[in-house]
Amino acid sequence: MKTNNNLGIWMDHSVANLIDLNSKNECRSIVSKFTSEIKEDALVRSESLMHNKRQQMNEKFYENISSQILKYNHVLLFGPTNAKVELRNFLHKDLHFKDIKIDIVSSDNITDNEQIAFVKNHFTTN
């Protein structure tokens, strides 16, 4: 019997909570290195530098997440910001992800337990 290889990712631009219901460690987090301190420091120098820094650090953040996604065949991206859409666009540029089904759903800032319930609900109804 084949097990479902599903991953839920609640994310915004600062953190991604990876939720694998089949794993002993159900949840783990990947934190973006683009902090408010780095933003302020770059903004003091110039706005264009700050945008370039944000873009570089977001790309590194998405690379870290994508390396985890490769292990799955169905992924749910959800959260309150457009980071989930940016990650999906990042993944679509890479052929390694062409066979992975990616769902995107908007959600509010929710607790860890609510995130787990959200993922369970999504994968049992889909």
Image (cartoon, rainbow, N blue to C red):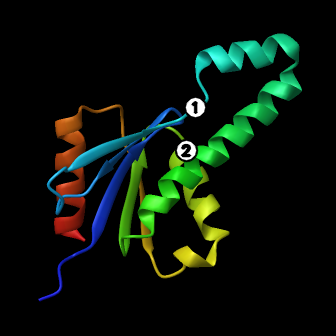
Three-letter amino acid code of the residue under disc 2: Ala
Q: Residue at x 66, y 38 (%)?
A: 57
Looking at the image, can residue 85 be seen?
no
Q: Is residue 19 left or right of residue 74?
A: left
Q: In which quadrant is the C terminus drawn?
A: bottom left
| Left or right: 70 as drawn, with respect to 53 | left
Say which quadrant the N terminus sits in: bottom left
Secondary structure type for disc 1 = loop
Give the crowd class for mark 2: few <14, some 14-19, many >=20 residues within 10 Å.
Answer: many
Residue type (three-letter) at the residue carrying disc 1: Lys
> Disc number at residue 33?
1
> Image height check: is 46 above or below 120?
above
| Residue where numbered disc 2 is placed | 83
- Name the side, left or right, on which 119 lies relative to 91: left
Give x and y (percent) for residue 4: 22, 76
Question: How many other residues sit within 10 Å of disc 1, few (<14), some (14-19) or many (≥20)?
Answer: some
Residue 83's quadrant in the figure?
top right
For the residues labelled 1 and 2, say whether their Cβ atoms are less than 8 Å apart: no
